[in-house]
Image (cartoon, helix red, strand yellow):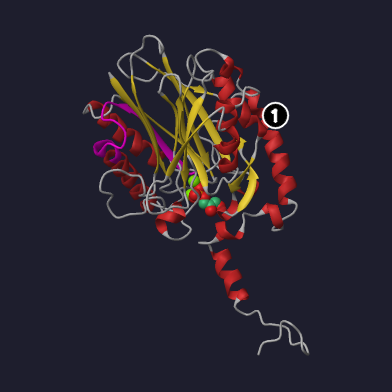
Amino acid sequence: MKLTLSLIKADVGSIGGHTRPSERMLDVVRKEVAAAIKKKLLIDGFVSHTGDDIAIVMSHTHGEGADPIHKFAWNAFIKAADVAKKFGLYGAGQDLLVDAPSGNLRGAGPAVAEIEFEHALKSPRAAESFMVFAADKCGPGAYNLPLCLCFADPMYCAGLMLPQMIKGFRFHIIDMDNTEGDSLIQLDAPEDAYKIAALLRDNERFAIDRIESRTYGFTAASISAHRLHNISGKYSGKDDPIAIVRNQGIFPAPEEIVLPFAKVHYVGGDARGSHVMPLMPVALNTPVAGVYCLPIISCIGFSVDRAGHFSDQYIDFFGDVAWDDARLRAQQKALEMRAQGWSGAAMLPYAELEYSGFRDTVTGLVNRFKYREEKGGKGKKK
Ligand code: 13P
Ligand code: MG
Ligand code: MG
């Protein structure tokens, strides 16, 4: 059977500032998911939050980009936004950027990551298991470094040296500066590794869209890579990317996938979406409460049975005590960076502030610059 995993998330309102959605909002979305399972639109579904973003992970047979699935998620988010409005919550409906999307939600505000695959449950996938990542207060390229290290560097993923992975992985990389449409390049690791790095070093412009096994042609990972300000034309919240990553067997194992996140690498995002701060691994359903809304990321794992149902329990990878040290280091790195306030590397480059009020402030001042009056000087205006 062809099975699709769809992960769709949106910020549609939160309590006491941009911290977390309310339980009432989550309940509404859970009820919608239960009704969709009953109606057989979905095989299974699971609702959670990471910071102020609600994520719905679904299994179904409608394929990627399917209208009924995307419409369903949109309507569930509308209902949660109505609850947020009713109770006066902050940012009600924030990520629902268009009036009524035609169907597919790509370009409408919510983030989407999907993988369709032959759910054979026999060789080479005798069992299906996958991980769901969700990041908050964070730019679109947050997965560039960790997923590149996992899928292209045996220092992080020794599994790459095994026969089922030694041919490497194909990276589909999107140029988010191209707003005419989705503009992608395919590069193959290991031979294109330096070219992949040359693009992925720029977390604000290039992002991994998809990673495929070169041996089997199967998709290993799908990442939501878009910039909200490209859609709305102004700063309307941070991109807060999500990802689905299949694991084990012909793909890296969970421990190989999570290892690079122990770096707590610096990403764009944070307060007013305009700073550079470390990405802190957190338990699922964690609110944003740290200093300067430190970017956070959750990671959970599910198995999938023959009929496409999720396991009745999930593993909360980053919720484990094993990640306490990473959390502490993230906060130390955060305070080090915050110690230099607005200076240089602590804030995103000017181009990334383009649609925010910071840009307006600077532009207003730039217009007031005048050449120095100097006798015979080079800069003298005629
Ligand atoms: P969200 O996109 O999570 O609402 O964050 C916006 C922001 O600017 C944080 O300071
Ligand atoms: Mg928000
Ligand atoms: Mg958010």
Q: Where is residue 102 in the image (x, y as percent from the top left)?
A: 25, 48
Query: Which part of the image, by quadrant, shows the N terminus?
Result: top left
Report the front residue among 35 and 343.
343
Residue 308 belongs to magenta span: no
Q: Mark 1 points at which residue?
A: 325
Q: Where residue 61 sits: x, y (%)?
A: 27, 26
Task: Classify residue 26 as left or right of residue 285.
Answer: left
Q: Is residue 157 above or below residue 235?
A: above
Q: Residue furthest left?
A: 39
Asked whether residue 16 is in view, the answer is: no
Q: In this view, does 301 lie to the left or right of 291?
A: left
Q: Looking at the image, can residue 52 be seen?
A: yes
- Judge whether residue 59 is colored magenta: yes
- Residue at image x 77%, y 87%? 374
Quadrant in which the C terminus appears: bottom right
Q: How crowded is mark 1: few (under 14 residues within 10 Å), some or many (20 or more)?
A: few
**Residues drawn in magenta:** 52-70
Camera-side residue: 170 or 38?
170
* Secondary element at image label 1: helix
* Residue pictured at 28% horizontal, 39% vertical: 72
Residue occupying image coordinates x 31% and y 41%: 76
Tell me if 218 is positioned left or right of 377 in this view: left
Check the image and report above or below for 5 versus 80. Answer: above
The residue most toward the front is 191
Indicate the position of residue 221 as horizontal and vertical percent values: 46, 29
Given residues 123 and 303, the one toward you in this image is 123
Q: Name the residue at 73% across, 40% down.
A: 332
Image x and y of residue 88, in percent: 42, 54
Residue 273 higher or lower than 72, as above or below:
below
